[in-house]
Amino acid sequence: MTTIYDIARKVGCASSTVSKALNNSKEVSDKRKAEILAVAKELGYVPNSSARRLATKNSWSIGILFSEDLNIGLEHHFFSGILQAFKTYVEDLGYEVTFVSKKVGTQELTYLEWCKYKDIDGILIVTVDVNDENLNELRQSGIPIVSVDSGLINVPTVISDNFQGTRMVLEYLMSKGAKRIAHIAGPLRSFSALERLEAFKEVLGKYNMDSSQVVEAYNYDFNSGKKALHELLKLNKTLPEAIYAASDDIALGVILALRDLGYKVPDDVSVVGFDNIELTRYTSPSLTTVAQDKVRIGREAAKHLIAQINKEVDTEQATIKRVPVELIIRESTK
């Protein structure tokens, strides 16, 4: 079995330098670290987990807290992409990833109790209900935490720039002559949905346009989009010229409902989504949408969490990092 001494001999450095590089220490330059990691991979080095835990006083285990309250599911294109990028980054550094649960066997535990039981080094929080009271003690525990696509108080967050994306959508629709624009918001227990709604009102207010045509979809799915479209039509006697939906799944549900009612997209009304899931390229019409950089979100979240674990940043430094988005124009708008 390959040891750190084998790696040190091939690289031509001290075994202590190899150990520091494998533990992602800042005492080793990025160039030297990359060289050591490449040789370790070439030689098939597998670290001894027990020895590593003793040496670093870490468990080398990261918990992922993924709530199903919003009915999104792990298979969702956006969140699965984030999780894959996050997982790849931390596993390359030697961490194991596990999902946080509220149970050990038949025993019910809080999130914090479970993390302490499993001796978790850090936590990635994904798609939680911002009103979940069970998160409070976790936030106050001192365990390194980072979240994606949420706005938890006192928790560093990596999120798409919802304000930039919404502004691009609305200004594009206005440039095409749309004056009556409606918004089908996502479930307002979701931080991203709240931000997109806030941005919708802010941008239309800036242009002195009506921002009252808003309906909430209660989940991020097709059926919620269809139901929300019917609610929108009950509130308004006339069809808006454009509909901005808070997600692609909602937007596709809106298009199906419009088609069932005899309306044509984009001839009668333009529809825009948010996510750029793979399906939107192949629907008829293909969907104009906002593309989110899920790989960058996952990697940025991983970098920030590892920096907290290594005590390179303050665990109580609650920052929001906004990742730029891109407007993808397709057939559902005119």
Image: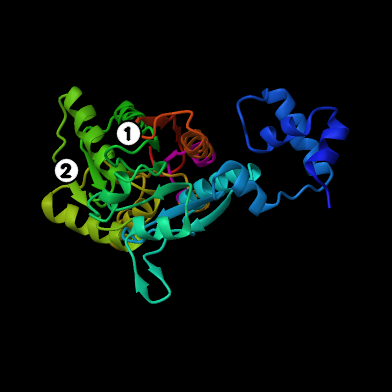
Q: Which residue is drawn at 39% across and 54% down?
A: 249
Mark 1 or 2, closer to the camera: 1
Left/right of residue 16 with respect to residue 87 in the rendered view: right
Using the image, determine if residue 169 lies above or below residue 61.
Answer: above
Q: Which amino acid does label 2 sit on?
A: Gln
Left/right of residue 60 with respect to residue 174 in the rendered view: right
Residue 245 visible in the displayed image:
no
Residue 107 visible in the displayed image:
yes
Using the image, determine if residue 152 lies above or below residue 65.
Answer: above
Nearer to the camera, 262 or 210: 210
Left/right of residue 202 with respect to residue 325 in the rendered view: left
Q: Where is residue 303 in the image (x, y as percent from the top left)?
A: 52, 35
Q: Which label sits on residue 213? A: 2
Q: What element carries label 1?
A: helix
Q: Position of residue 199 (x, y in %)?
A: 25, 33
Alpha carbons under labels 1 and 2: distance apart: 15 Å
Q: Which residue position is annotated with label 1?
A: 166
Q: Which label sits on residue 21? A: none
Q: Alpha-carbon neighbours of circle 2 within 10 Å: few (<14), some, or many (≥20)?
A: some
